[in-house]
Image (cartoon, rainbow, N blue to C red):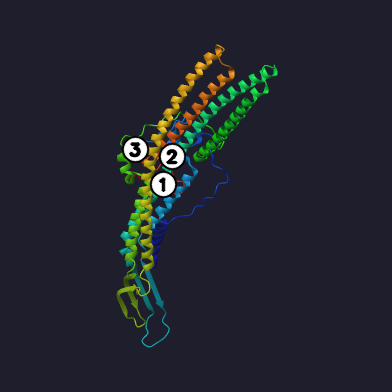
Amino acid sequence: MTHRMFRPALAPMLAFALAGCATYRAMPLTERPNLASSVAELDHTIPASAAGPAQVLPVDQPLTIDQIGILAILNDPDLASEHAKLEVARGNLLTATTLPNPQVTLGFAALLSGPGATTPAYAASLSQDIMALVTYRARSAAAHDDYKSVNASLLWQEWQVAEKARLLALTVYGDEKQIEYRSSELSLLNNELAGVQQQTQQGNLDLTAEAPLAVAVATAQSSLATAELARLDDWQSLNALLGLEPNTRFPIAEPELAPLPSNMPELVASLPERRPDLVALQLGYSSSEASLREAVLMQFPSLLFGPSYGQDTSDVKSLGPTATFDLPIFNRNQGGIATAKATREQLYAEYQAQLDGAYSSVQALQKRITVLQKDYQDSANAVGGAASAANNAEQAYSQGSIDQRSLVDYQTTVLEQQLSAINFKTQLQSDEITLGAELGVGLPNTLLASHPIPPANTMHHDQVTPQ
């Protein structure tokens, strides 16, 4: 009767137990590349966050370098694969914060023979790992800090990807300008060479007048070819960062960088609280502190404790506590403690080195930007002077005071000065972008890239804000 009453309740209990179990689903690797052929095919929606609602980037018009940096965060293939580390850290956190299951021991001895033997022998015990309870808080704290550290590290990687994309976009724009000026220079020299060759054929000039121009044309052709190759390399690097096909092109708006913040000393002083890489190292160090506390606690003997019930063959029943523990004769977790201490010392040194490097980089960039600002201004002034001289030369040429070769020299001088100004401007803006990234100015404070493994229903989009 009892068995019949139990059977109807067995199915719901079994179903409830299985409902919490994980299931397996195969996820085969793809056999095709996942490169987009246009910017419109990229993910260009900035997800909603504490900073504001979702935004859609206007990919149907020239993109600013800041928008290109956001696109890189949302689409960089390497960055997407890095987000799997967050799931590993989440799994470690779940493991660390889950108590071990109680251990059940069952025993049965069938009655065979013997004096006073009347019944079979039974034994049952239930025990729990007490050491797991003792170390729970330290273990849990270490896992929580480690998870936050991975989260902050991923945010720093997003910043690095955005910085790299912005620098590449700036370089590509500078490449385009260089090619424009070098093409104009080559066109001027070719026209001058054609005129000299015509005069030579008519006997008005000898071959010595043609040789210097031929050398100048060859030099200009080589410089243009080098600039075109550099542009190709920069475009391919930028496309790889965005997840685009190598030959894809899109318009880039003229770079207009915001001025550097006026509160520079305050930003530099608050670097440890704002830069994700420093925050990640701080959290990693905190995790190592908790791991060391756990290792110290684990030097005490491991203890299993719980109730025990038994019945011997003479039908004598017993009930009482049971304790199982190690004798700390050989192993008192000396190795674990030594490893935890060494890890803490290593992280301490890494944080100090990273902090020193951050301050040094900021100070060096500030000095370099000051020098480049002067160089760019001098170069821009030189462009104005060369342009004024070229205008005077054109008037003199129209009056017959100078020949065409002299006029071309004045015109090519303007182009060379413009090229120099473009180079200084690109270097200056590159350093300003790098300094902004070092200070954490104008960059998102939460993770933007989505996780790369969509089938799992336990994936969440995490955010981290450096404090």
* Mark 3, other Cα within 10 Å: few <14 / some 14–19 / many ≥20: few
Q: Residue at x 58, y 25 (%)?
A: 186
The reply, left or right, for residue 139 in relation to residue 174 is left
SS label for mark 2:
helix
Which residue position is annotated with label 3?
51
Residue 120 x, y percent position in the rendering = 39, 79
Vertical position of residue 64 compared to residue 402: above or below: below
The quarter of the picture where residue 329 lies is: bottom left
Which residue position is annotated with label 1?
154
Residue 127 x, y percent position in the rendering = 34, 69
- Mark-to-mark CA distance, 2 and 1: 14 Å
Residue 330 x, y percent position in the rendering = 38, 74
SS label for mark 1:
helix
Q: Earlier in the sequence, mark 3 or mark 1?
A: 3
Q: Which mark is residue 163?
A: 2
Vertical position of residue 467 compared to residue 224: above or below: below
The quarter of the picture where residue 215 lies is: top right
The reply, left or right, for residue 218 in relation to residue 133 is right
In the image, which is nearer the foreground, mark 2 or mark 1?
2
Q: Residue at x 31, y 77 (%)?
A: 318
Find out whether the residues at labels 2 and 1 contact each other: C-beta distance under 8 Å: no
- Mark-to-mark CA distance, 3 and 1: 18 Å
Q: Earlier in the sequence, mark 2 or mark 1?
A: 1
Find out whether the residues at labels 3 and 2 contact each other: C-beta distance under 8 Å: no
Does the image show residue 252? no
SS label for mark 3:
loop
* Mark 2, other Cα within 10 Å: few <14 / some 14–19 / many ≥20: many
Residue that lies at the very extreme toward the top in this rendered image: 399
